[in-house]
Amino acid sequence: MRPHRRTDRREASNRLRFLPLHLALEGYLALHFGGPTVLWAEWSQRAVRAGLSPRAEEAYRGAEVRGLADALRVFEILRGQCGVLVYVADALAAAFAVPHPEDYRALHATLLHDLFGELIHHYALLSAPVPEFRASIPGPGIRSLADLRAAVDGQERAWAGFHDDTMAAGLLAAPVRSRPVYRAGRFTLGRFLPEFRPGRENHIGETITDEDGRIAYLKTFRLSEAQVRRGFLLDTLAAHDWHLGAAAAALNGTEAQLGLRLEAAGFGALLRQDVLDGYRKRARTGTAAGTAQPEASRRPSSK
């Protein structure tokens, strides 16, 4: 037996130790980890006894993301730089920020030891090269250094707007659910989860913020589409007390369709085998009728 330790541990009265990104991933893996909170008849005994245990997700070390090591080696670190956004094939892979430029210079290469999602690994492996972004300053109208400086400033503003509103909008503009994990003096260590929007970017992450909410530390992890679907299904079930019929109605589908979506997402073991077989039979025969249990079948959970 191997004892498991918390990912955040107090080292001294004013010191805290935690593993980068493990805190964020722990929050995702613990999402509705206990399983059904109401014992509807469709759930298996395993779902009742163990919930989503064991729960595992796949991730890749930065060293396995093709091209990342070379990019970090040639990347120009600017004076005063405290962080970086990593893009792979124009997809935002990760954000990393630390309190001081010297911290960033010391930790720049550690991105190779960070974790990246399946989507980013595949993009680096399979995607074709993407076109470079180049500034374009028109020659006409530039008659002095002041004109050239104004044109350069305009290009920088345009790039900043395009980057924040388009390239990084999936992280910067998306709503998240944050939870504090530990407080030390005026700083708070926390992690956040997205609202799990299928078909769109979804990032999890961890932060250290001061009393004014300013970022002193940030790391993020982009979820794959399969991971987003799993989070979305779990959130939907939890929002409807794990009632398959009610959750299916909220998704504009049938109970059988939802059951098969759960199986495809890797949660098939949570359903009773005979119920799952019935869903498969309905899918083969085209039957759309549901088998939602009446309200009287709900029993209080002993979990």
Image (cartoon, rainbow, N blue to C red):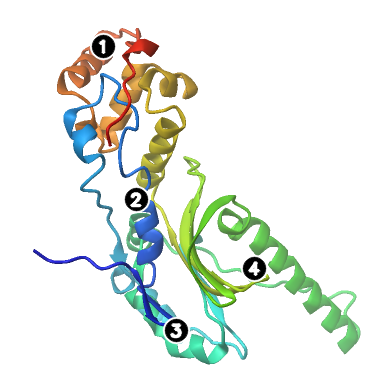
Q: Report whether 51 appears left or right of 228.
A: left
Cα–Cα gap, marks 1 and 3: 54 Å
Residue position marked by numbered label 4 in the rendering = 213
Q: Report whether 80 appears left or right of 146.
A: left
Q: Report whether 145 appears left or right of 38.
A: right
Kindly identify the residue that appears in the image at 61 percent across and 56 percent down: 169
Q: For the residue labelled by badge 1, is the local secondary structure a helix, a strand or a loop?
A: helix
Image position of 227 with respect to 49: above or below: below
Q: Nearer the viewer, mark 1 or mark 2?
A: 2
Q: Position of residue 118 (x, y in %)?
A: 33, 56
Amino acid beneath label 3: His
Q: Residue 108: which disc?
A: 3
Q: Nearer the viewer, mark 4 or mark 1?
A: 4
Circle 4 packing at 10 Å, graded few (<14), some (14-19), many (20+), is few
Q: Position of residue 36 (x, y in %)?
A: 32, 32
Cα–Cα gap, marks 4 and 1: 52 Å
Cα–Cα gap, marks 1 and 2: 32 Å
Image position of 258 with respect to 112: above or below: above
Circle 2 packing at 10 Å, graded few (<14), some (14-19), many (20+), is few
Residue position marked by numbered label 1 in the rendering = 282
Contact between labelled residues 3 and 2, with CB atoms less than 8 Å apart: no
Q: For the residue labelled by badge 4, is the local secondary structure a helix, a strand or a loop?
A: loop
